[in-house]
Image: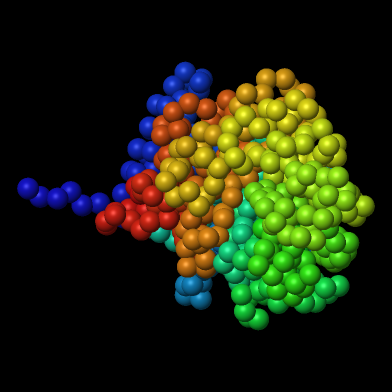
């Protein structure tokens, strides 16, 4: 039997058509006739309409509008031009006449010149791609946003409307004209990165931050320090980073500044974490007095003033680096046996008339007060809320991880909450498939609108015990993108059968990540981050 042959570009087109068909079938009655499939934009915009025409994009695309006055916008425009025109215009020197393109300018209009990046910053944008005008013969691309960070989100969406045509060797805007009105569902859309269990070079962290911007994630939760290593420079207590694995696996103050600034240019906040009083054995390598004893090294010694002096010094130095209003103080998995089994700590507990549980509360609240004096709102893992909810400072953000049901309890008591249920959003759990990540709902069990507003959003957590530079990005992507759409897109447009609504689009986004140099793993493999099981198209894995 003979084989039917088609050019690669035709196979690609046929695949996208089939994907679009199945997505449109999934939506059924929710799309008014004529039925239109969901576009291959990830995460899905709030409102959109599109046509059926293609526009060619000029490789000399220029930036106009008052947005061009912003260094953040100009830098982003240059980045996206590099992405869109990575094939270049290699044969222009052979042409005697310059080709005529449909679109030669991108206009960005900002309604504010503020570039302050904080929780809840306005990230909304409107994006319009118009058909060429009769009088000018040129199409128009316009992004309108209230802030530069909304403009960044609009640029990302615009980049996903464009694709290189291998036949004409031009970049085309497909499905024009476009009208998109978009905004995020939640203000906090995070990825936690653990650099204590395995050191990640600064360039790798930057690659991850860059990839976060493609999925419109906006918070890097940097779990810098843990019991295994203390890689960060703290000028006030310079011996602390003796707790690093080696002298080559460290972050200088300048490295941390660079990561924060690199993130801001992409509209991403960095929330640092110093986990206390547990998960801190590495502190005592440089300052052994922080250990209850040499044989019992954590939790940190609650009985000594020195412990809190060091903690205050760390936070003072870190406040100069991390401007984000939230700071994570950990507080999870605290085993107090060291306190009750160490002579001087046990004596202190007796003198203070405290139990070990009382001392745990004392330590957490004292750490919170230190953060509050530096104008940070403290974030704590849920054990603190589960153990002494009435004692936590009202500005506390409760970070869920142990399982479902915590955020409903936290917001009912007036606390803000971040959703990271380990059963669905812990990326080191390799047996959690993409659709389980996708269908997880941060507002589950919360009915009152006033309480729903207290859920800031959520984050996927990349714990580093089994992830280093060799596999961390494959472990993050594409499953983190599934959570990113849940946190950005409207709930009613992304609910239902995930395989019908999202699978083809997520596979397409995974291939987009690959084209941009991000080693995202196949979507449908049984275990995350595993290699393809055999030959096949990127769009079908």
197 or 61: nearer the viewer:
197
* Most distant residue in the right direction: 373
Residue at 38%, 56% (x, y): give it.
530
Picture residue at 68% right of the left edge, 27% below the top = 408
- Compared to residue 459, the image places residue 201 above or below, namely below
Q: How is the image coloured?
A: rainbow
Count of marks placed on residues:
0
> Residue 97, how many percent across, how many down?
53, 68
Q: Is residue 370 left or right of residue 531?
A: right
Residue 420: quadrant of the picture:
top right
Asked if 275 appears above or below 409 in the picture, the reply is: below
Image coords of residue 191 (percent x, y): 62, 51
Left or right, residue 469 beside residue 203: left
Find the residue positioned furthest to the left. Answer: 1
Identified at 58% across, 25% down, the residue is 492
**Where is residue 57 shown, x and y percent of the image?**
56, 55
Identify which residue, 218 or 277, lies in the foreground. 277
Image position, residue 24 (x, y; %): 43, 29
Residue situated in front as seen by the camera: 291 or 511 = 291
Left or right, 452 with reference to 45: right
Instruction: Kindly tell me whether residue 538 is visible in this rendering.
Output: yes
Q: Residue at x 45, y 43 (%)?
A: 432
Is there any visible trace of residue 43 in the rendered image? no
For residue 198, which quarter of the picture? bottom right
The reply, left or right, for residue 91 in relation to residue 121 is left
């Amino acid at each position: 039997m003979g084989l039917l042959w088609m050019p690669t570009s035709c196979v690609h087109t046929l695949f996208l058509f089939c994907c679009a068909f199945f997505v449109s079938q999934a939506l059924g009655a929710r799309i008014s006739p004529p039925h239109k499939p969901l576009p291959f934009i990830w995460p899905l915009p709030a409102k959109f309409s599109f046509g059926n025409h293609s526009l060619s994009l000029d490789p000399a695309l220029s930036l106009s509008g008052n947005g061009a006055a912003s260094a953040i916008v100009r830098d982003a425009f240059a980045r996206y031009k590099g992405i869109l025109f990575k094939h270049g215009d290699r044969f222009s020197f052979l042409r005697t006449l310059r080709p005529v393109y449909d679109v030669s300018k991108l206009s960005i209009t900002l309604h504010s010149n503020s570039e302050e990046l904080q929780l809840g910053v306005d990230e909304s944008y409107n994006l319009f791609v118009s058909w060429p005008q009769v009088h000018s013969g040129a199409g128009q691309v316009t992004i309108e946003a209230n802030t530069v960070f909304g403009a960044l989100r609009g640029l990302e969406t615009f980049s996903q409307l464009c694709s290189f045509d291998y036949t004409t060797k031009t970049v085309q805007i497909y499905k024009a004209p476009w009208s998109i009105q978009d905004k995020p569902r939640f203000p906090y859309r995070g990825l936690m990165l653990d650099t204590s269990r395995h050191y990640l070079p600064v360039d790798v962290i930057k690659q991850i931050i860059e990839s976060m911007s493609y999925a419109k994630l906006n918070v890097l939760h940097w779990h810098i320090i843990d019991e295994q290593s203390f890689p960060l420079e703290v000028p006030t207590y310079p011996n602390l980073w003796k707790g690093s694995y080696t002298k080559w696996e460290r972050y200088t103050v300048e490295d941390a500044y660079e990561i924060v600034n690199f993130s801001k240019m992409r509209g991403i906040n960095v929330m640092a974490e110093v986990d206390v009083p547990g998960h801190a054995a590495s502190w005592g390598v440089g300052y052994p007095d922080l250990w209850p004893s040499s044989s019992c090294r954590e939790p940190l010694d609650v009985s000594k003033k020195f412990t809190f002096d060091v903690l205050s010094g760390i936070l003072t130095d870190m406040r100069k680096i991390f401007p984000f209003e939230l700071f994570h103080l950990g507080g999870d998995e605290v085993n107090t046996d060291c306190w009750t089994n160490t002579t001087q700590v046990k004596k202190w507990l007796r003198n203070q008339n405290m139990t070990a549980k009382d001392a745990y509360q004392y330590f957490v609240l004292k750490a919170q007060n230190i953060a509050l004096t530096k104008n940070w709102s403290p974030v704590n893992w849920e054990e603190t809320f589960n153990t002494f909810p009435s004692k936590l400072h009202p500005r506390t953000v409760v970070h869920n991880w142990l399982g479902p049901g915590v955020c409903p309890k936290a917001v009912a008591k007036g606390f803000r909450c971040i959703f990271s249920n380990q059963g669905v959003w812990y990326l080191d759990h390799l047996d959690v498939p993409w659709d389980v990540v996708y269908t997880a709902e941060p507002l589950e069990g919360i009915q009152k609108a006033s309480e729903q507003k207290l859920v800031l959003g959520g984050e996927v957590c990349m714990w580093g015990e089994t992830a280093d530079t060799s596999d961390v990005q494959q472990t993050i992507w594409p499953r983190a993108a599934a959570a990113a759409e849940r946190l950005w897109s409207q709930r009613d447009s992304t609910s239902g059968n995930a395989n019908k609504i999202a699978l083809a689009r997520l596979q397409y986004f995974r291939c987009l990540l690959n084209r941009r140099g991000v080693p995202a793993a196949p979507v449908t493999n049984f275990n995350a981050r595993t290699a393809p099981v055999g030959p096949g198209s990127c769009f079908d894995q």
